Every structure is written in structure tokens, then in C-alpha cells.
Image (tube, rainbow, N blue to C red):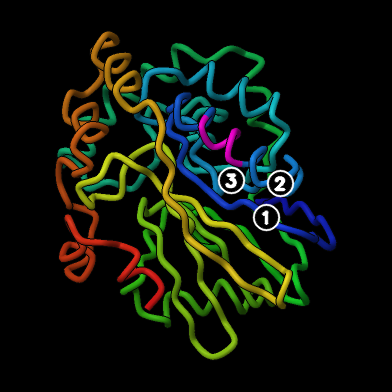
Amino acid sequence: MDTKTTYINTVKGKALLFGGIYSNLQALEALIKVAEQENIAPENCFCTGDIVGYCAQPEETVQTFINWGAHSIIGNVEQQLRNGEIDCGCDFTEGSRCDVFSKAWYPFAQNHLSETSINWMQTLPDYISFTYADKKVVLVHGSYHDISEFIFKSTAWKNKTPSFNETNSDVIVAGHCGLPFADKKGSLLWLNPGVIGMPANNGKSHVWYAILNDTNDFSYTFHTLSYNYKKANTLMTEQQLPPAYAQTLLTGFWDNMEILPKEERLWKGRDLFKIITH
């Protein structure tokens, strides 16, 4: 299958990294305000995909993202939508709660997206590559070889290394798994900034993103984002989307941990700042 990479050459100054907007317009609007406050231009903002997902405003979210002018690679959800597929392609176990819920939110998104939004998804690259503070950075969704692969902090490096080898990169910025983390091995860094569309199973309503900084060589910081989660919850309820996901916006806890490895299951309800960078 042919893939597309967008090459941006060198990025300078602060760069905003995030993923998984999941049709959560309120979270996206809050993040755009953060970018403005941090004086981060749209061309220095990078999304790891899954702009569309569980929440109630897929069309409004896509159009807001387009108008903002930030960069994004394609997530598995956009890939499925632009190909006219009947499911989200999230690689959930058949018959699991996540699989059952996807049969509600995915058709909703499919039915509420305009032709303009679907056509825009056709333009999204599979990967984005740029140099930042003398390091080669590559954005992937799941992994380089599998858009739907769940890569976590606890995932063995034998599963992470091929993405670095294939791209000849120093830093992989990835999404898909829904949890923020950084994992280092020698000079290599796997960085997942987290998602802004759903909380990170830590019992808090806030969501996560990261900022790269080149002031003193290469550095990164994780940040939490507060937004109008009550409105997002209400809109999901009004549209009769899965109540369990709407409740997650309020409680900060996932409905289930089916996709999580044993180690990440232990993160539930904990202070992630103490976990994700160590």
C-alpha cells in the first residue's frame, strides 16, 4: 500500500504536539487558545490523528481544525472514513465493549461529516517528518508499520525499534493508545503527547498535550488541558452516543481497560506526571 510523508524541513521555536481530538470541539477550541497564549503558530502545531471519534461534533471539529491551519497525519478513524469503510479500524477485540460502542459513534460520525470534510481527509499524509533542534522527528499514528498498533510505555522496545529504523529518526511522536508517555532508549525517544478528546483514565476531567522547546537544545514538557467538558458531555447525551464515553468526560475514568497492558492498568487514578516521564 502506498504511503505519503509530508517533509517540513526544520521547525524552530515551540511546537505543540497532541492527538485524538475525537470530535470534541470544546477541547479543540481550548487547545487553540493555549497555542495563541503560548505564541505557537498553527504551522508549529502537530496532531497525531483521530480528529474524529467518540464525541458529538465531528463536522464542526474537522472544520475548526481546517480553519486553524495546524498539521495532522491521518489516524485510523480518518483512514476508514475516507475509504468509506463500515467500522473505525481501531483494532478492538471483536465483541468487546469498545467494539460494541464503536458501532454507535462511528456511524454517527460518518453520517454527520460533509463531503468537504471527507475530501480533506484524502489530503492527510500518513507521516510527517521534520528536523527539530538537530533531531529528526517523525509523526506516526500507531506505529510506522501499523496505523492501528497500540504502543504503550510498557511496550517492549523490539516493537518500537522498527519505526526508528524505517524512518531513520531520533524521535517518534505517536498517538492512538490514548495515554501520554515518554520512553527513552539511548538516543532514541518515543513520545506520545496524549489525546485531547478523552481523559487519560486518571480520574481527572483534564486532557493532555505536549510542547517541544528548542531554547536549550531539545526538550519536551507534558501539560494538562482544561475545557468545557460538561458541555461536551451534554452534547453526547443529547445525540444518544454511548453513555459510558459521555460519563468518562465527567469522571476521568475509562469505561474499561480492555486495550491496556498490565502495567498501564495500574496507572488508573494515579498522578500521571509522576509516571509518564520516568
- Residue 257's label in the rendered image is none
Is disc 1 placed on a helix, strand or loop? strand
Q: Which residue is mark 3?
A: 47
Instruction: Tell me if label 1 and label 2 are in contact, CB under 8 Å.
Output: yes
Is disc 3 placed on a helix, strand or loop? strand
Q: Which residue is mark 2?
A: 40
Instruction: Tell me if label 1 and label 3 are in contact, CB under 8 Å.
Output: no
The verdict on residue 267 being magenta is no
User: Residue 150: x, y in percent?
Assistant: 37, 59
Q: Residue furthest bottom?
A: 186
Residue at image location 67% in from the left, 74% down from the top: 218
Residue type at tag 3: Cys
Is disc 2 placed on a helix, strand or loop? loop
Residue at image location 43% in from the left, 28% down from the top: 24
How many residues crowd around disc 2 within 10 Å: few (fewer than 14), some, or many (20 or more)?
Answer: some
Residue type at tag 2: Ile
Which of labels 1 and 3 is toward the front? 1
Q: Residue furthest front?
A: 37
Residue at image location 59% in from the left, 57% down from the top: 211
Q: Which residue is mark 1?
A: 15
Q: Earlier in the sequence, mark 1 or mark 2?
A: 1
User: Residue 189: x, y in percent?
Assistant: 54, 76
The reply, left or right, for residue 241 in relation to residue 36 is left
How many residues crowd around disc 3 within 10 Å: few (fewer than 14), some, or many (20 or more)?
Answer: many
The verdict on residue 32 being magenta is yes
The magenta span reads 30-34
